[in-house]
Amino acid sequence: MGFFGSVLGILGFAIGIPIGLVVGFFVFVYSQPSHEEYPPARPLVETSITLLLDLLPDIPLWMKNPDYERVDWFNRFLSYMWPYLDKAICEIIKSSAQPIFADYIGTFCVKFYETNEKELLFEPSVKWAGNPNIVLVIKLMSLRIKVQLVDLQIFAIMRVALKPLLPTFPCFGAVVVSLMEKPHVDFGLKVLGGDIMSIPGLYRYVQETIKRQVSSMYHWPQVLEIPILDASTASVKKPVGLLHVNIIRARNLLKKDLLGTSDPYVKLSLTGEKLPAKKTTIKKRNLNPEWNEHFKLIVKDPTSQVLQLEVFDWDKVGGHDRLGMQMIPLKKINPGEKKVFNLDLIKNSNIVMDVPEKKQRGRLELDLRYVPFRDESLKYRNDVQDEKSSEDDDEFLSNAGLLSVAIQSAKDVEGKKKYTNPYALVLFRGEKKRTKMLRKTRDPRWNEEFQFTLEEPPLKESIRVEVMSKGTGFHFRSKEELGHVDINLDDVVANGRINQKYHLINSRNGVIHVEIRWTTG
């Protein structure tokens, strides 16, 4: 009977009937010999239901129902409970943190803004006062003069943006900082025991110089961008279109020269870009200059970028005086629409003006057209094709475009030395772009992209990519070419994109991975 009970238990388990395992187990147990008398052997069908029911509560749940071995139940539990757990957890954190921050409320002033972008935007008011021990040494010929900085005070209102928001810790790609008004910086300078800031007129001059220099670099819409995550991780924004800017003319500009005239030119740039600003030609001795000069700027975010226009008076010696400036948010321009602006020039971009300016600085006339690249412009054209003539379409889809060159990686690049410090150079139409240098590797991964704005498609042209190695330490001046490749751009224009690996010329086994795109409006 013991053998019969074992077989019955195994059979019950094999056919997936838990009760068979249970019954077999107990038949096996009760059929084993003991020091006492053997229990009477009876067929299972004769076992009373009452006896089986008495035995079932002692059986583990995982034997009765195999589903208890899985964790699906926990996932389903969380999915049903999470809306309520979310509120409960937030209330616990809020009630625990509120007493901690209660002491700081009112001490720091912060404005927080909600936007439609994937970013956190706030404006803290920063106040700091202290007495740092900073000593500067100024050398004049053989004379050394010690200058001590004392009683430093700083007051500034900043705009801080954490963007873009990402699922990778710390959950944002960069910190973008700009000043909302000129900062206040107060300090004393002690030389030979005396405070030179007490010299009449010097204090005000130093104050204004610091404010002017700092504002020119970081006053909104100028920004200081501090990258936090690597560009490949942070999903850097790609160009989405071109902004066509036509600087037409200016009227009634300020007189800056001794002869009662000025030598004006216009400087234009887009916020959020590190590319050099564009400049018009200089119109000598003219307060009503005519330019009619056309520029193309790369647009990455038409919802947040701002076109900054500055009119300067050119001087042969010293700095150029700014006659006035203006700003145009790109969100004011509909895609494909040509819009004319006639703007009154202002002194600066101060949002909070201490005294309203009464001086007339003249007017600047220009027209703008934002042309999205083909994938977006085609969507726009489908919506408005009934309203635009074929001639307008031809003008809308101009030949101008953007050539994007992405240097992805290289493999088996070898030099004269065991280890190389490779970087890549992109040469096109006299321009030279360079990737970062990677140390001690033969298989570099750069993942860097460069853009060239072109008036016409680059037909019958080629672009050269060189892989170089630069020495470090005592050999920092030594450079070595590890190979190069010339890529014909006809296929790029025809297909819109190529993504290939090329064998490097003058390299035994070196291969470089390059992606090139040609996008037009």
Image: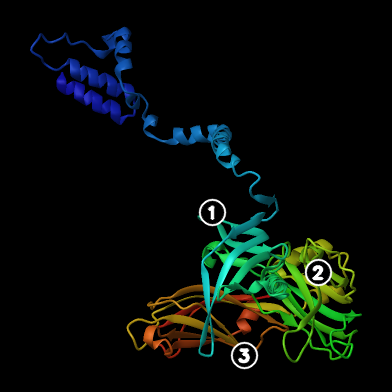
Residue sitting at the far left: 35
- Assign a secondary structure to mark 1: loop
The mark that comes first in sequence, 2 or 1, is: 1
Q: Please tell me which residue is depicted at 56% across the width and 32% down the height of the picture.
A: 88
Q: Is residue 43 above or below residue 504?
A: above
User: Picture quarter containing residue 433?
Assistant: bottom right
User: What amino acid type should be assigned to the residue bearing mark 1?
Assistant: Pro
Of the residues tagged 2 and 3, which is closer to the observer?
Answer: 3
- Assign a secondary structure to mark 2: loop
**Residue under numbered circle 3:** 430
**Residue under numbered circle 2:** 336
Q: CA distance from mark 1 to mark 3?
A: 40 Å
Residue 434 placement (x, y as % from top left): 54, 81
Q: How many marks?
A: 3
Q: CA distance from mark 2 to mark 3?
A: 31 Å
**Residues packed near mark 1 inside 10 Å, few (<14), some (14 to 19) or many (20 plus):** few
The mark found on residue 40 in the picture is: none
